[in-house]
Image (cartoon, rainbow, N blue to C red):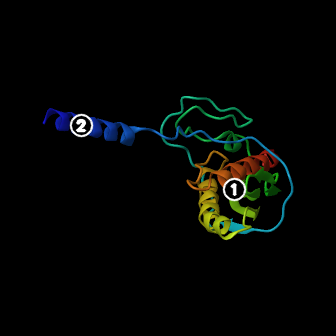
Amino acid sequence: MKKIFYGLMMTLSGLVLLMSWRTSWGEQITAADATAGSTGLTGQSSSSGSTATGSGSASGSSSATGSDSASGSGSASSATATRLADGTYTGDAVSTRYGNVQVSVTVAGGVITSVDVPQYPDSNGRDQQINARAIPTLVSETLDAQSAQIRMVSGATYTSQGYTRSLQSALDRAQS
């Protein structure tokens, strides 16, 4: 009887530890990488765009070059700290394991008003299925955050990383 009790307690303790395990520390990918590109998905916003600030506190620091933060989501990013020049800017095509990702942003009034993804992995049905969900989510995150400091999409890690790198290079070009 004691063995059963101890077994149940160990199982319960293990489940509590497993459920409380934090799998992500909110780190952002912001480095630029380059290759080549062609056609793709478009995401646009009809809102005039507002600058969003993150929730929580950041224990790391971010610099004008877009360094990774150690944890949490900080306040407005470096891309919004420096005014963005109006126009359309295309980021570098970033090579990922499944194909290239490239992002183009349109800035009006110093605010990102639309995001276009002219190139993303879509060579097979699985890529198409993943990116049909991931690209609109990434575009929405970008329009909300007004920066490259966005959350990655679960199940679309490679696309999210490539998207973030390409977005950062487009925003670097847009800074005036």
Mark 1, secondary structure of its residue? strand
For the point 73% across and 47% down, which residue is it? 165
* Label 2: how many Cα within 10 Å (few below 14, some 14–19, many 20+): few
Residue 41: horizontal and vertical position, in percent? 71, 68
Nearer the observer, 80 or 62: 62
Q: Which of the two residues, 16 or 106, is positioned nearer the viewer here?
A: 16
- Compared to 1, does 101 lie above or below? below
Given this view, does label 2 or label 1 mark the residue nearer the observer? 2
Q: Position of residue 174 (x, y in %)?
A: 79, 49
Residue under the point 61% across and 48% down? 150
Residue designated by label 2: 7
**Residue 56, image x and y in percent?**
48, 38
Q: Disc number at residue 112?
A: 1
Q: Residue at x 81, y 54 (%)?
A: 93
The disc, 2 or 1, on the residue closer to the chain's N-terminal end is 2
Where's residue 170, x and y in %? 78, 51
Left or right of 39 on screen, residue 70 = left
Disc 2/disc 1 C-alpha distance (Å) = 56 Å
Query: Compared to 93, does 22 lie above or below?
Result: above
Mark 1: amino acid: Ile
Question: Quadrant of the rendered structure where residue 117 is?
Answer: bottom right
Rendered residue at 59%/39% (across/down):
27
Number of marks present in the image shown = 2
Most extreme residue toward the bottom, as rendered? 125
Determine contact: label 2, label 1, CB under 8 Å: no
Disc 2 element: helix
